[in-house]
Every structure is written in C-alpha cells, then in structure tokens.
Image (tube, rainbow, N blue to C red):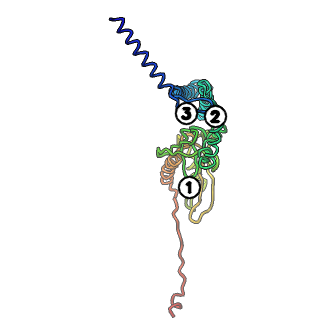
Amino acid sequence: MEKGLWEFKKEKIGDFFDLLNDVLNIRLFSIGDSSLTLGLLITLVISIAILLFLSEWIKKLLVNRVLKRYQIESGTRQSVGTIVKYIIVIAGLFSILQTNGIDLSAFGILAGALGVGIGFGLQNITNNFISGLIILFEQPIKIGDRIEVGNISGDVIKISSRSTTVVTNDNISVIIPNSKFIDDQVINWSHNEYKVRFNFPVGVSYKEDPEKVKSILLQVAKDNPNVLESPQPDVLFDEFDDSSLNFYLRVWTSEYVNKPKVLKSQLYFEIFKRFSKEGVEIPFPQRDIHIKSGYEKLNN
C-alpha cells in the first residue's frame, strides 16, 4: 500500500516537472537562428538583474574603498567608478547573451532600427548620452563642483548617462540634460581647486580719506574667519562716481564658494559697524537743482 502511494506521488511529481518543462519551453519568438523561450526569458531577466546589482556594488567598492586610498578627489572617483560600471554592464550583457545561445548577429537588424529611430526622434536622448560620456572622460565638471549654467547655480551631486543633478542653495534639485554642459557656456567655480575670489563693492563720501577706508576694509576682511589669509585680501580704488568714491573689497574663500551672499552679508554688517564707529560717511544719491531767474519774462 505504501509502495503504491509512493509510486503515485513519484508519478505526480514527474508529471509536474514535465508540465513545468513544457511551460518553460514555450516559444515566444525567434531572434535570428535562436528561439526565445519563457525559461530563457526568465534566465535572462535574473542574470541581467544580478549583473546590474554586481556592477553597482563594484562601483561603490571602487569609489569608496580602492580609489579613496590614493587621495583622489571625490568627483574623479565617481567618474572612474561610473565608467567602470558601464564597461562591466556592456561586457556582461554580451557575455550573458552568448552564454544563453542568443544569436547576436540578429542585433544588426535592431541596430539598424535604432538608427532609424535616432534619425526620427531620439536625437536628444543620444546627444545627452554621448555628452554624459564626454563629461565622465574629460571631466569639465565633477561631483562636488560648484557650477553655474544659464540662470542655475548649485553643487553637482550626481552625473548619470542622460542628465546631471544640481542642488541649489535653496535645496532644490535641478535635473539638467548633459548636452547643456557641452553646448552651452558653463562656469565652474571649483574646477581647479575649491577656492575663489569675490569682489564686493563699497562706496564712501567724497570727504573721506581713501587710505583710512582701505585700512578699515582690510581689517574687516582679516577679522572674518571665513576669509582666507593666503592669498591676502586687498582693496581696489575703482572710480570717482557722481556721489561717492567707489572701492572693491576683494577676498578669497574656500568655505563660502557656494554661499557668496552669506559672506557678503557678514562683511557688510561689520563694515557698517566699523564705518559708524570711525565716523565714515556712506553716501546716498544727491542732485543739485539750480533755479535761474527769468520766470517773470516767460509769463510776460
């Protein structure tokens, strides 16, 4: 009785696997000389998912562990890691397709169809993808750079194959197509090093001594901890304006590259306090109106 029950279960299990095998061998469509079955499709999906997971893991390992030992800049590490990830994904896809017996010659037809698609409507996508590769290889911008493109100013936090993510000082993420960085003018405030010079205008009355004004401005700059000591701050006498003597206070900073208005505000608060203490007059627009006689003649 038990032997008969075992034989029955064994037969049912065999029938299940036969049914499963028939389902997995269902032919979906053909690619060249190869047939894509349901089982092959599932295998490809799982293999590609594992490939993407491994490529991302290798990228993070390379960026955060290997390259970090050599004191390479964060933006450069991210660029190298992204390039390595693309290479692994492309090589892995070809390997997976060949291992599973997919006829790669059939992809020539797909490439032709893709070329037609690019000609009719995918120019922007292709342009942004190629621009992304150029950005990664040439590195006109890197992750962590302070940039200005068009009317958008912010820090680069991510460079992907199609677009670049920039975060503004208001914590707003702006997604910019990569082609903008190749076709348009881009200001990179931290391309060579994360240190920039700002020029802040200051005006005083004509009755003030320029040397005294220069001394006060330099002292304000030196007392501010966010202003670099080297290169040293300096003051330029810019022009004799209609109502004022105009100067430029020029300071270097590395802490406030992405917040110039905050540094400007700090300096202006202190300049106003020092001017008030030293009796230095800050001018305001003035116009002298001279009224000539002759009104009576006009009425006559």
Comes first in the chain, label 3 or label 1? 3
* Quarter of the rendering containing residue 79: top right
Q: Horizontal and vertical percent for residue 73?
A: 61, 32
Label 3 sits on residue:
29
The disc placed on residue 106 is 2
Which residue type does callout 3 highlight? Answer: Phe
Q: Which secondary structure lies at badge 1?
A: strand
Q: Please indicate whether residue 13 sits to the left or right of residue 228 in the image.
A: left
Measure the alpha-carbon separation of dots 2 and 3.
13 Å
Comes first in the chain, label 2 or label 3? 3
* Residue placed most toward the observer, 26 or 228: 26
Measure the alpha-carbon separation of dots 3 and 1.
75 Å
Q: Horizontal and vertical percent for residue 136?
A: 63, 37
Which residue type does callout 1 highlight? Answer: Val
The disc placed on residue 202 is 1
Q: Is residue 202 above or below residue 158?
A: below
* Front disc: 1 or 2: 2
Q: Is residue 93 above or below residue 228?
A: above
Q: Horizontal and vertical percent for residue 225?
A: 53, 40
CB within 8 Å, label 2 to label 3? no
* Front disc: 3 or 1: 3
Q: Which secondary structure lies at badge 2?
A: helix
* Quarter of the rendering containing residue 81: top right
**Looking at the image, which residue is at 59% across and 35% down?**
75
Q: Which secondary structure lies at badge 3?
A: strand
**Looking at the image, which residue is at 52% across and 61% down?**
283
Q: How many residues crowd around disc 1 within 10 Å: few (fewer than 14), some, or many (20 or more)? A: some
**Looking at the image, which residue is at 53% across and 75% down?**
289
* Residue placed most toward the observer, 150 or 118: 118
* Residue placed most toward the observer, 41 or 28: 28
Which residue type does callout 2 highlight? Answer: Ala
Q: How many residues crowd around disc 2 within 10 Å: few (fewer than 14), some, or many (20 or more)? A: some
